[in-house]
Image (cartoon, rainbow, N blue to C red):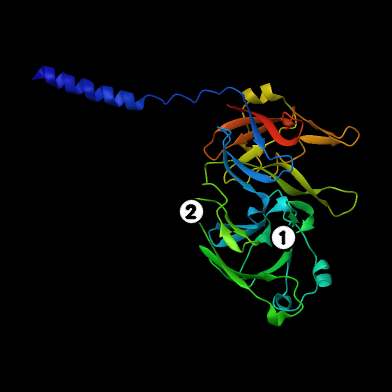
Amino acid sequence: MRTWLWLAVLVALNGCIERELPIPARQPGDAVIRHADLGPDYGVQLHVQLHTGEVVASHPKDAWCTRFHFDNAAVWMDLNGSRFMHITPLGQDMVTGAISQDQADALPWGVNRPAGRDSSQLINDGSAWAIDLGRDPANPIASLGSVRMEFLSVGPEEVMLRVGDLVSEQPDTLTWDTLWISSNPNISQSHLSLLRREAVDIEPPTGTWELYFTQYTALLNSDDEEPVEYLVTGVLHHAEGVRVLQPNEGDWSFWKEVEWNPEEWSDDWDVMGFDWKSYSLTDGTYSIDSDAVYCIVTPEGREFLFRFLDFYDDTGATGRITYETLER
């Protein structure tokens, strides 16, 4: 009887000790080189998973026009900046009124900031906008047209809106399409095509991707007071919980070992951006700043070093982004 009692005690103690052993720390990974291919015409947008390099989702630039982020009681709307889309508020007198092409051209058009959302992108019941659908990816000098949009109801789970052609000099014959966009708990943004006038499935589930390789509209500093709108090719990181630091000093080896300070992280979407490359008008070629290092933290707390290596494929065509990552 005593022998069995001691065996029971030993088994119990062994179980406790095993459960209380510390979990081994994740071992740093080796640096790996990966590619993200946008094509020579930069015609696709890629959702990429950082730790595998997998392209989780790929779609052409004309697959969507606006996307909606449901954040508790607030709903935000973003434009597809890869097509140089523009937007401007519409007064209630213009929502159903006649608008000529000259009047449309004279509207105070603007773009979304690539760094992230601001209050101008909040939508409410009755909000109305004119939206320039941007350039045709198949013919970049051609316009995809423009629409007027009015939000009929805005709730924490769904919005209802109507869309019609912007230019119409006979408002009595203006036709509207009524659309519904719903929140999806598995994704961060719900997408809408104003070309097809329907909701579209674009974004992969939250947590399966961190980086978005795409063209987008940047705002460049100029000698004038107003920044210059310019279509660029690069990387955005608007996935929920992703934070990025671009150090001002220190090389790859330094940032591989040093402790990262959480206070230096940025929630801006365009820290990685586009200016890791530069274009020579003399040579007609791109050069890469491979000394630029980016420190990336995922929502799960995984830490990655990242740097760009190339912008050309094996044939010499642009649009294939080669990069190196290392998980600490």
Q: Quadrant of residue 327?
A: top right
**Which kind of residue does numbered mark 1 sit on?**
Leu
Q: Position of residue 274 (x, y in %)?
A: 75, 40
Residue pushed farthest top? 3
**Which kind of residue does numbered mark 2 sit on?**
Pro
> What residue is rendered at 52% in x and 58% in y?
183
93 with respect to 102 (left or right): left
According to the picture, the residue beneath numbered tag 2 turns out to be 185
- What kind of element bears circle 1? loop
According to the picture, the residue beneath numbered tag 1 turns out to be 133
**Residue 218 versus residue 280: which sits nearer the camera?**
280
285 with respect to 164 (left or right): right
> What residue is rendered at 73% in x and 51% in y?
138
Q: Position of residue 67 (x, y in %)?
A: 61, 57
Question: Can you say which quadrant of the picture contains the C terminus?
Answer: top right
Q: Position of residue 179 (x, y in %)?
A: 57, 67
